[in-house]
Image: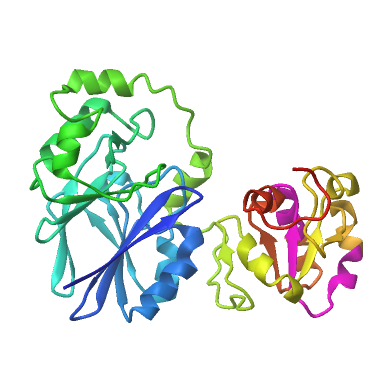
Amino acid sequence: MLIFRQLIDSRSSTYTYLLGCASTRAAVLIDPVFEQARRDAALIEELDLSLLYTLETHVHADHVTGAWLAKQRMDSEILVAKASGATCADRLLEHGDRIEFGTRYLSVRSTPGHTNGCMTFVLDDESMAFTGDCLLIRGAGRTDFQEGDAATAYRSVHSQIFSLPATCLLYPGHDYRGLTVTSVAEERAFNPRLGGELSESDFKGYMDNLGLAHPKQMDVAVPANMRCGRPESAEALADEPDWAPLNYTFAGIWEIQPDWVEEHANDVTIVDVRETDEFDGPLGHIPGSINVPLCDLEARAPDLGDGKPVVTVCRAGGRSARGLQILKAAGIEQAANLAGGMLRWRAMQFPVDGGTD
């Protein structure tokens, strides 16, 4: 029996997949995300699994992998494609390799085109395959950077993925519409870029004219992922805060989600670091929050140590991230940045004082 979970990082729309052997409890994690390392570790512990490996479908350009953090937490090994050029892995994978976890295993199929190091992982009974960005649900990964090549991608899909049984379920690396799974039969028939009678030249013409901007995190994510997600100033993260469910970003910032803050507003001190006119402006402010403009925060930091954890907030989360660093330097350890700032708070329709509709 297979233990299977599909997880999502909403910020990058990245899917992470946990597969475990029910009899031995051995597990693998495909495409972990740095900021979700605590979530993944908690789930693995709750399911009583032992993580053997983290697997990367490719070197990602839109998020930083959580492979290094998983290794620090759970002593798992990092597996990456040899063709990716990454030198940080414990094992470099090639086409035809087999990744065993307990009584189950994944077969490795090389599927370049989106990047040189793209791989598809196929479950032992060919009932499931994990395609990364090579094949998406009714789409395909772009081919205009990171050694991408449309003709190569077309051949990869047709020779290595469409050759699987029609009933094989396909799980992509991303989806931006909330779709979770497809099948070989569906994509053969309905994929508007690769299915039906569409030829290699049809696909190349489509992909060469997408006209998309490069991923916003590319300049950070690609170098970091060539290091398997290891920060340049690596920390073991031994002393993690336990006062709230926090996410640790690759930039070294502890973030907290708005829904937790809304439910526990009386248990924290909310410090809004925007200017006073913004605090009283159209976005309004969180009820009970204290307005301390960022330029004044260092001087006033000693007055904020009232024993409660501190949550910093601004318009979108940038200035308040800097505010968090100021508080940490002032000795306030129990502190976190409100993810997404007031923009996300308002988008989630939580209460505000002041502001406009």
Front-lying residue, 317 or 231: 317
Q: Look at 22% across and 19% down and name the residue there.
A: 202
User: To which quarter of the image does residue 325 belong?
Assistant: bottom right
Residue 286 is at least partly visible in this image: yes
Q: Looking at the rendering, in which quadrant would you find the N terminus?
A: bottom left
Front-lying residue, 132 or 237: 132
Q: Look at 80% across and 57% down and name the residue there.
A: 272
Height in image: 150 above or below 89?
A: above
Magenta extent: 300-323
Q: State the image coordinates of residue 99 (x, y, percent, origin top left).
A: 18, 63
Is residue 143 located in the magenta-colored stretch of the structure? Answer: no
218 left or right of 325 in image: left
Residue 253 is at least partly visible in this image: no
User: To which quarter of the image does residue 203 belong?
Assistant: top left
Height in image: 91 above or below 59?
A: below
Q: Look at 18% across and 40% down and name the residue there.
A: 186
Q: Look at 21% across and 41% down and name the residue there.
A: 111
Q: Looking at the rendering, in which quadrant would you find the C terminus?
A: top right
Q: State the image coordinates of residue 94 (x, y, percent, origin top left).
A: 19, 51
Is residue 315 located in the magenta-colored stretch of the structure? Answer: yes
